[in-house]
Image (tube, rainbow, N blue to C red):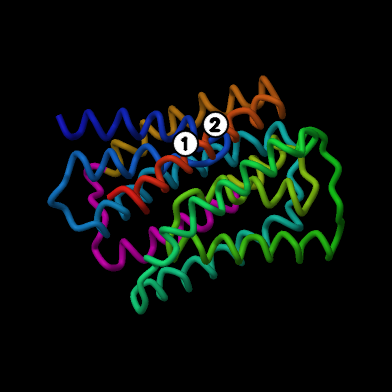
């Protein structure tokens, strides 16, 4: 029964994550519900072992249909990978608990800004090119990569928002770029969890197949319906993240 529950959750998580991020909102609670006595690090590691495949496949799909600025995004992915390792190391030294109460407020600001700026992310008009684009993208990769390693909830959505806000991408291009960056940060975390023995591969591999199926379906919808659809899903996912992180921070 546990395998069925987490596999279905991974399918839905892959679908949501491939569009705007936020798959962890679905899969991580499902893992904690199915395995209440497991070590949290093992559940986080198993989550990464499944989700990294979905984000990777989504990156490939997007790159075939959307122009990817590889000269900017590839260094940003390296920065994200490195910073994620740093964040994961830091979490072994200090607790990220202070972020738990801060996160809902940050997400509320993101949601308000996105709704208020009705044209935000509707048109693809990159603000930078060349070295400038690479530096800004790498800064975003390092910042959110560190956050992903240290804490994590909403990483994909933060990538999307910052690529829209600071690089001038529309939501579709931002989602494509976010998948590459999130794949890199997921790989860094997965590497650490694997070295520490915190991945249940017999679950992760089955979940990974489901995650890929969901990811393919979600990416297909995003590419078919375009920026307006992705923007709408982004608003829904951020709203759900606010409710979930707010509950975790103040109600438990």
Residue at x 48%, y 73% (from the top left corner)? 86
Q: Quadrant of the N terminus?
A: top left
Drawn side of residue 187 relative to residue 157, left or right: left
Percent coordinates x, y for residue 195 in the rendering = 30, 67
In the image, residue 63 sits, relative to residue 106, either above or below, namely above
Residue at x 76%, y 66% (from the top left corner)? 135
- Residue 27 got which mark? none
* Distance from Cα at disc 1 to Cα at disc 2: 6 Å
Q: Is residue 105 magenta?
A: no
Region in magenta: 180-203
Instruction: Locate residue 222: give its quadrant.
Output: top right
Total labels: the figure holds: 2
Drawn side of residue 128 relative to residue 210, left or right: right
Q: Residues within 10 Å of mark 2 (few under 14, many from 20)?
A: some
- Residue 240 got which mark? 1
SS majority, magenta: helix
Percent coordinates x, y for residue 182 in the rendering = 54, 51
In the image, residue 181 sits, relative to residue 114, either above or below, namely below
137 or 232: nearer the viewer: 232
Instruction: Locate residue 95: give its quadrant.
Output: bottom left
Residue extending furthest toward the bottom = 93
Describe the element under mark 2 as helix, strand or loop.
helix
| Contact (Cβ within 8 Å) of mark 1 with mark 2 | yes
Q: Which residue is mark 2?
A: 236
Percent coordinates x, y for residue 32 in the rendering = 23, 45
Instruction: Locate residue 77: give its quadrant.
Output: bottom right
Q: Is residue 188 magenta?
A: yes
Q: Residues within 10 Å of mark 1 (few under 14, many from 20)?
A: some
Describe the element under mark 1 as helix, strand or loop.
helix
Residue at x 52%, y 36% (from the top left corner)? 239
Residue at x 76%, y 49% (from the top left corner)? 69
Percent coordinates x, y for residue 67 in the rendering = 76, 39
């Amino acid at each position: 029964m546990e395998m069925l529950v987490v596999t279905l959750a991974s399918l839905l998580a892959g679908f949501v994550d491939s569009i705007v991020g936020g798959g962890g909102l679905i899969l991580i609670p499902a893992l904690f519900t199915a395995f209440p006595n497991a070590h949290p690090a093992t559940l986080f590691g198993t989550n990464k072992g499944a989700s990294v495949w979905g984000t990777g496949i989504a990156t490939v799909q997007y790159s075939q249909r959307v122009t990817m600025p590889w000269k900017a995004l590839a260094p940003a992915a390296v920065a994200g990978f490195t910073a994620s390792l740093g964040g994961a190391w830091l979490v072994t030294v200090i607790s990220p608990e202070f972020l738990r109460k801060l996160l809902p407020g940050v997400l509320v600001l993101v949601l308000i800004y996105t709704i208020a700026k009705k044209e935000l992310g509707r048109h693809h008009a990159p603000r930078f090119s060349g070295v400038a684009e690479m530096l800004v993208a790498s800064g975003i990769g390092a910042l959110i990569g560190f956050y992903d390693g240290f804490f994590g909830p909403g990483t994909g959505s933060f990538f999307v928002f910052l690529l829209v806000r600071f690089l001038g991408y529309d939501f579709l291009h931002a989602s494509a770029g976010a998948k590459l960056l999130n794949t890199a940060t997921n790989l860094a975390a997965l590497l650490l969890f694997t070295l520490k023995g915190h991945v249940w591969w017999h679950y992760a591999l089955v979940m990974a197949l489901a995650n890929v199926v969901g990811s393919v379906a979600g990416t297909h919808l995003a590419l078919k319906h375009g920026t307006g659809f992705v923007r709408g899903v982004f608003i829904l996912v951020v709203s759900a993240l606010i409710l979930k992180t707010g509950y975790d921070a103040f109600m438990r």
